Image: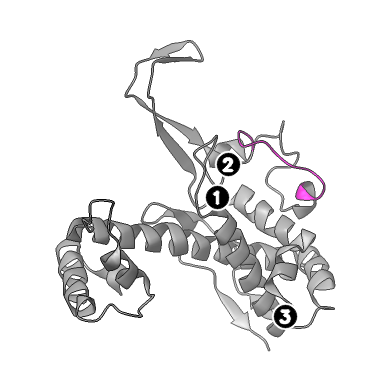
Amino acid sequence: EHRLLPPRRRADHVAALSAEYRQKLDGREDILSLLLSTKDEEGKGLSAEEILDQLVTIVFAGHETTAVMLAWAFYLLHKYPDQLARLHEEIDPLPLETEPEAIAKLPFLEAVINETLRLYPPIHVIHRRLAQPMKLMGYDLPAGVVVAAGAYATHRLPSIYPEPEQFVPERFIGKTYSPFEFLPWGGGARRCLGAAFAMYEMKIVLFTILKQCRFALLETEEVKLTHRAGTVGPKGGIRMMLQR
């Protein structure tokens, strides 16, 4: 609901919530209360604008990207039923109450997520502002220039990923790729701080839903890409029917 509001009303909405939450912060551990309670070494708290920025970042980076990836994962698994069957071979023998740490270690489940991220990285262009001049492919670039790495294009290079358009989770079994070959979390040292949590979350969600539900894919044509608020997702969503 918050994301659908225009920027001015969004700021007013957060300001009203902040005023309400400030009245009773003791014992509260929700994100807004923690942000309101945060103080720096000089005892200064976050401004209203900083709190708004933090909340938008959490929604965008922590939930939007994960939701987009899960939509693509369900799409690909049901577009390639042999891969779905192999995933069920791994998860079906396990009880629904399996410890999350054990779920997180399932190799084919992790491979499915990595292959989904390869084909459809939610953030498909990673920007970097140069701190110092550099030479790139014959071009002299001054400090301050913004350059970008294309994750979507890199992930489809046949020299790195044979049959790049195919959904082949096995390519991530027993093989790792460098941060310059596989970059759904950004490239180099400045990768996504929430990468480990996002992987953990996606594994738990896929395991829990696929253990209890069966779906039929209603999409009869290739799903197109569309630019969302900073991410690239499935145009029109993924239509599926719950069977049981």
Outermost residue to the front: 42
Element at label 2: loop
Q: Quadrant of the N terminus?
A: bottom left
Mark seen at residue 175: none
- Residue drawn at point x = 56 percent, y = 37 percent: 153
Q: Earlier in the sequence, mark 1 or mark 2?
A: 1
Q: Closest to the observer: 215 or 131? A: 131
Q: Earlier in the sequence, mark 2 or mark 3?
A: 2
- The residue that mark 2 highlights is 183
Neighbor class of circle 3 (other Cα within 10 Å; few <14, some 14-19, many 20+) is: some
- The residue that mark 1 highlights is 121
Give the foreground label among 1 and 2: 2
Element at label 3: helix
Residue type, numbered disc 1? Pro
Q: Residue 88 location, x and y as percent?
A: 79, 73
Q: Quadrant of residue 202?
A: bottom right
The answer to whether residue 228 is above or below residue 84 is above
Q: Residue 159 location, x and y as percent?
A: 72, 31
- The residue that mark 3 highlights is 211
Q: Closest to the observer: 140 or 225? A: 140
- Label 2 close to label 3 by CB (< 8 Å): no
Neighbor class of circle 2 (other Cα within 10 Å; few <14, some 14-19, many 20+) is: many
- Label 1 close to label 2 by CB (< 8 Å): yes
Q: Earlier in the sequence, mark 3 or mark 1?
A: 1
- Residue drawn at point x = 71 percent, y = 53 percent: 167
Residue type, numbered disc 3? Lys
Residue type, numbered disc 2? Leu
Residue span colored magenta? 172-181
Q: Main secondary structure of the magenta part?
A: loop
Q: Quadrant of the C terminus?
A: bottom right
